[in-house]
Amino acid sequence: MSTLTIPPVLSSPRDDAVQLYRAFKGFGCDSAAVINVLAHRDQTQRALIQQEYKAMYSEELSKRLTSELSGKLETAVLLWMHDPAGRDALIVKQALNPDIPDLTAATEVICSRTPSQIQHFKHIYYSRFGVYLENDIEIYTSGDHQKLLLAYVSTQRYEGLEVDREMAMKDAKHLYKAGEKKLGTDEKTFIHIFSERSRSNLHAVASAYRDMYGSLKKAIKSETSGHFEQGLLTILRCSENPAKYFAKVLYKAMKGLGTNDSTLIRVIVTRTEIDMQYIKAEYLKKYRKTLNDAVHSETSSHYRTFLLSLLGPNH
């Protein structure tokens, strides 16, 4: 469920392009006007605006935005201009970077996406960057974390709701034997089950595990560590409730002193048109505060206006 608010009477992509051009003209940029257009247009409308802008002014809109905006607002708006698969490809490519790697961001995006979303962004990754996603994972990650990501992006998983209860029971037993029951951990079993099972089946595995041995999340936390642990927990939490998972990621990004703006931008921009209504509901339920209020207190200026526009009304 999207939180995007689109005006009831919509101007044409051509008029939007003209409005943006006017906002860029003269001394300084009218950021409020830019936000007023772009934060209230869906993916298809944004693509049409970009086409019109290029046709009319012989310039890429994204290039113009780069030169007119700055800081966190620039980062957020530029990310918003992509379609979801293009955005995921860009985030992962920037995160798998030798200079400033952000393996947390790469792991979050890969492990929280559905198999069809992964296939789509893998295709764009290759066509845009000329390298296979798997190659970059091999170069920039290591160990069990690497093995998990490689298995996760290359396995076709079932996306329906049907559950094989018998298999779920077996998987729960295998995970117990591979983790809590033995000295050390058999990571291979965790990688196999977490990369091969559908979300609905993995949810059933966690439920069977809880009935027999206790919390599977606790077992993962005590048996694994680092980005491997993050990957497993992301896969598990998204199999149970993706909105709850992202509400927690947002809460952590704003908790304590300072704000992790790259996480804040990444999650709000990538989830606005997917499930942000559900994330907002989960946030309110768990943290007794609306997500809008939290974002309002952690951000400022046009950057705040842009994020709050994507989040929609505060209720």
Image (tube, rainbow, N blue to C red):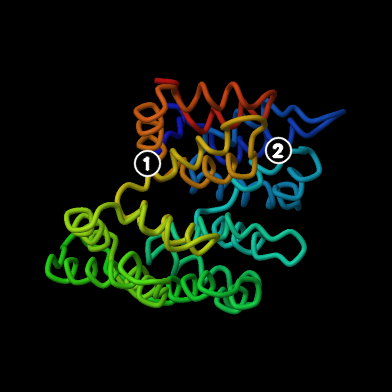
Residue projecting furthest to the left: 166
Q: Which residue is mark 1?
A: 244
Residue 142 % position (x, y): 59, 74
From the viewer's perspective, is residue 138 above or below residue 74? Answer: below
User: Residue at the spot x=62%, y=26% of the render?
Assistant: 298
User: Residue at the spot x=49%, y=76% of the render?
Assistant: 147
Split into 4 quadrants, where in the image is the C terminus?
top left
- Compare residues 216 and 280 and report the one nearer the observer: 216
Q: Which residue is mark 2?
A: 72
Residue projecting furthest to the front: 183
User: Residue at the spot x=76%, y=38% of the render?
Assistant: 71
Which quarter of the picture shows residue 160? bottom left
From the viewer's perspective, is residue 229 above or below residue 296? Answer: below
- Judge left or right: residue 96 versus residue 121: right
Name the mark nearer the viewer: 2 or 1: 1
- Judge left or right: residue 267 versus residue 262: left
Amino acid tagged 2: Lys
Residue 109 % position (x, y): 51, 57
- Judge left or right: residue 245 versus residue 303: left
- Compare residues 58 and 297 and report the one nearer the observer: 297
